[in-house]
Image (cartoon, rainbow, N blue to C red):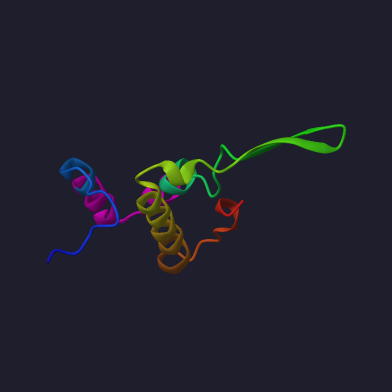
Amino acid sequence: MQACKLHKSQPLWMQQAKNWLEGLKISTPEEARLICKLIPAQCPFEREFYLFGRRILRIPPLCKLNPFYEEFVGLRFRALCFLAEECGEDISQFLV
């Protein structure tokens, strides 16, 4: 008897793109800084709207709907680690 799959299988191109993102090697500080600037530390779409001091609307973080979210977060983390450990740079500017 076959086990049930709890999630849909992804198209081949999507899995290949995820593997490519996971396999990217960061080799220069310039590459690492560019990655840290391009991939935000927080979801830029999450917002709360207030009227007269009361929250009237909340837009939840939408980044997790992106099928490549985990790979982008991992790539940004590897870039931050490269800058901190290999280059000895202060990464606090990228943590905001």
Q: Give the range drawn in magenta.
A: 16-34
Q: Where is residue 22 in the image (x, y as percent from the top left)?
A: 28, 55
Q: Where does residue 43 sit, x and y in percent of width and height?
A: 54, 44
Front residue (pair 65, 86)? 65
Residue 74 in which image quadrant: bottom left
Residue 52 vs 18, above or below: the answer is above
Magenta segment's dominant SS is helix
* Image coordinates for residue 24, horizontal then vertical, percent: 27, 53
Residue situated in front as seen by the camera: 50 or 6: 6
Q: Which of 47 and 57 is in front in this view?
A: 57
* Quadrant, the N terminus: bottom left
Q: Does the magenta stretch include residue 38?
A: no
With 32 as the anchor, is 17 left or right in this view? left
Residue at 86% across, 37% down: 53
Q: In which quarter of the image is residue 45?
A: top right
* Figure label count: 0
In this image, 81 relative to 14: left or right? Answer: right
Percent coordinates x, y for residue 33 in the rendering: 45, 49
Residue positioned most to the front: 1
| 23 drawn magenta | yes
